[in-house]
């Protein structure tokens, strides 16, 4: 049978695809990793607010609409995996042999005071260096693995409450503002008539879903949105400051080696038998909840965005656009308030949409997303950048 060609995207999807390509071209935002985020409200000046933007498992879409798409917390999914791992005593038996293990347990019973769990590796090493030096290092290493996992599991439970506490990340609001203060400005120039809408070569293979229409909350098939998207649209976006902000979970709670072990091995150990969360639930291609992670955020400050269109809107539609503008307008969807503004003006029915954001209040407009295998493989650079 002849192959049926895919149906062309709706006008707003086509416009969003073109905008994605413009951003990828004008900013250091490689289509192999970049994701646009909407809406982009002013970031509260606190570490917790910044960490909340980092603590996300993003969807497989070129645009992530935080108001529509499901957004599991990275910490929650990571913690669920770690709590499903096991470091049983059998790993120590395997390392030192059953006979030595029996001697070790007998020795522990002779001690007048049982050592704290975190001291077991050094106690074992001292004992084994006298009686079984050939397995002293292997046994101490196995015990360290057991102790480390148990301690990590206890720590993660303390984060989950009650009451729960936010998962910390390296770097905070003060460091971000300092980085923005020392960064360069940037400009995104866009013309829908000359920018390609082909996103088939991106990291999602062209999947771009769940984004808004002309204003935040408008459907992409909305009639006003469709009329706007079918027109020739231009954007001149001046970014007073632009940074790629590296996202690094705090090593006090994040152990990449444990997560890597869970990802690379589906057996027990390291997984408990039976685990509360099995490998497919965490990493599986169809329904895994930890398939991706944010490696860095695209953050701007002092935004001025001017959008024009050659569409001619009747007076009723003009009133709707003006009424809805405060919710945030395409393509950044910055809500009006706290110094941010949205203006919708019309010249003979043709719109001119202007969005501004003040100094000192950053906007998270995108992210670099890595599949979990690459994230755990250490593909990130120390600066949070990526090979283009």
Image: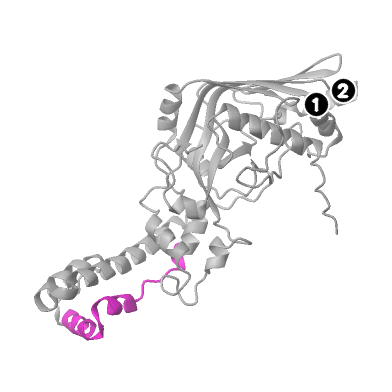
Q: Residue at x 59, y 32 (%)?
A: 24
Tell me the mark number nearer the camera, choosing from 1 and 2: 2
Residue position for label 2: 313
Magenta segment, which residues? Answer: 82-109
| Marks 1 and 2 in Cβ contact (< 8 Å) | yes
Residue 117 shows in the view: yes
Quarter of the figure that contains the N terminus? bottom right
Residue 107 image offset from top left, x and y in percent: 16, 81
Of the numbered discs 1 and 2, the one sitting upstream in the chain is 2
Say whether residue 67 is left or right of residue 347: left
Residue 314 image offset from top left, x and y in percent: 90, 22
Say whether residue 308 is left or right of residue 237: right
Q: Residue at x 81, y 32 (%)?
A: 225
Residue 181 image offset from top left, x and y in percent: 44, 22
Q: Is residue 108 magenta?
A: yes
Residue position for label 1: 321
Residue 151 against residue 21 in the figure, above or below: below
Q: Is residue 142 magenta?
A: no
């Amino acid at each position: 049978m002849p192959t049926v060609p895919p149906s062309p995207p709706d006008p707003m999807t086509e416009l969003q695809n073109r905008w994605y390509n413009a951003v990828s071209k004008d900013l250091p935002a490689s289509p192999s990793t970049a994701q646009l985020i909407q809406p982009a409200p002013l970031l509260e000046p606190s570490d917790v607010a910044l960490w909340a933007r980092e603590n996300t498992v993003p969807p497989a879409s070129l645009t992530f609409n935080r108001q529509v798409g499901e957004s599991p917390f990275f910490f929650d999914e990571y913690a669920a995996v770690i709590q499903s791992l096991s470091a049983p005593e059998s790993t120590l038996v395997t390392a030192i042999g059953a006979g030595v293990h029996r001697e070790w347990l007998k020795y522990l019973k002779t001690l007048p005071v049982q050592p704290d769990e975190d001291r077991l590796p050094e106690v074992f090493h001292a004992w084994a260096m006298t009686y079984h030096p050939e397995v002293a290092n292997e046994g101490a290493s196995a015990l360290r693995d057991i102790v480390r996992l148990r301690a990590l599991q206890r720590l993660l439970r303390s984060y989950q409450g009650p009451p729960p506490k936010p998962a910390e990340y390296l770097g905070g609001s003060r460091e971000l503002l300092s980085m923005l203060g020392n960064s360069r400005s940037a400009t995104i120039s866009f013309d829908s008539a000359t920018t390609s809408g082909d996103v088939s070569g991106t990291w999602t293979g062209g999947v771009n879903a769940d984004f808004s229409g002309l204003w935040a909350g408008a459907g992409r098939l909305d009639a006003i949105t469709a009329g706007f998207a079918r027109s020739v649209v231009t954007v001149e976006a001046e970014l007073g400051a632009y940074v790629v902000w590296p996202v690094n979970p705090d090593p006090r709670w994040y152990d990449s080696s444990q997560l890597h072990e869970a990802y690379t091995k589906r057996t027990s150990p390291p997984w408990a038998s039976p685990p509360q969360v099995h490998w497919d639930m965490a990493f599986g291609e169809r329904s895994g909840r930890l398939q991706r992670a944010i490696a860095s955020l695209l953050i701007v400050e002092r935004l001025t965005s001017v959008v024009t269109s050659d569409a001619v809107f009747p007076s009723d539609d003009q009133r709707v656009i003006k009424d809805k503008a405060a919710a945030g307008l395409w393509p950044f969807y910055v809500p009006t308030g706290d110094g941010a503004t949205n203006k919708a003006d019309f010249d003979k029915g043709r719109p001119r949409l202007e969005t501004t954001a003040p100094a000192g209040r950053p906007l998270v407009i995108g992210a670099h997303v890595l599949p979990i295998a690459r994230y755990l493989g250490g593909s990130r650079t120390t600066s949070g950048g990526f090979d283009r």
